[in-house]
Image (spheres, rainbow, N blue to C red):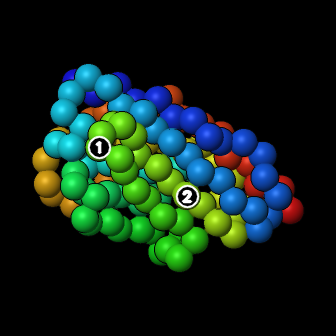
Amino acid sequence: QVQLVESGGGLVQAGGSLRLSCAASGDTFSSYFMAWFRQAPGKEREFVAMIGGNGGSTYYAGSVKGRCTISRDNAKATVYLQMHSLKPEDTAVYFCAARFGSVITTRASDYRYWGQGTQVTVSS
């Protein structure tokens, strides 16, 4: 069982940066693959980035590759998403998700644990 709490969202101008954080509690954090998803109004939840348990494996959606960096601090049981060069189309609620195991997957349905989300709004 893992509980996830996101923070760091907000309003930023296009071209700006934000760092999202997701604090986990409840189980051995390093045993979990962690990911960020986002959902814009009227759209399906989409994969953004993921990171393996030891931080050695990362994978990004094409829409954010080169503009986002996912990282984790297992000692703090926290995963981060650093976003640069933000665009209005990045506006969405960003969710942190966790799944136990080592299989790389970008499907939301494969992630069992979810945070409540944090709003990111990018103004043009």
Image quadrant occupied by the C terminus:
bottom right
Q: Secondary structure at mark 2?
A: strand
Q: Residue at x 19, y 33 (%)?
A: 28
Residue 111 visible in the current orientation: no
| Residue 100 percent location from the top left of the image | 17, 41
Q: Quadrant of the N terminus?
A: top left
Location of residue 98 by image quarter:
top left
Q: Is residue 52 above or below residue 109?
A: below
Q: Could one spot residue 78 in this view of the protein?
A: yes
Residue placed most toward the observer, 114 or 15: 15
Measuring 14% from the left and 54% from the top, which residue is drawn there? 102
Image marks 1 and 2: residues in contact by CB distance under 8 Å: no
Residue positioned 50% across, 54% down in the render: 81
Q: Which amino acid type is shown beneath numbered disc 2?
A: Gln
**How far separated are the C-alphas under marks 1 and 2?**
17 Å
- Most foreground residue, 77 or 93: 77
What is the x, y in percent for residue 56?
25, 65
Q: Quick one: 3 or 40, which is closer to the camera?
A: 3
How many residues crowd around disc 2 within 10 Å: few (fewer than 14), some, or many (20 or more)? some
Choose mark 1 or mark 2, whichever is in front: 1
* Residue drawn at the location 13% of the way across and 47% of the way down: 101
Classed neighbour count for the residue bearing mark 1: other residues with Cα under 10 Å, few (<14), some (14–19), many (≥20): some
Q: Dot 1: what SS? A: loop
Please state if 118 lies on the left or on the right of 65 as rendered. right
Q: How many numbered marks, from 0 up?
A: 2
Q: Which residue is mark 1?
A: 74
Q: Earlier in the sequence, mark 1 or mark 2?
A: 1
> Looking at the image, which residue sits at the far front?
75
x and y percent of residue 29 in the render?
24, 37
Type of amino acid at the residue the image marks with label 1: Asn
Q: Which residue bears the numbered disc 2?
A: 82
Residue nearer the viewer, 60 or 81:
81
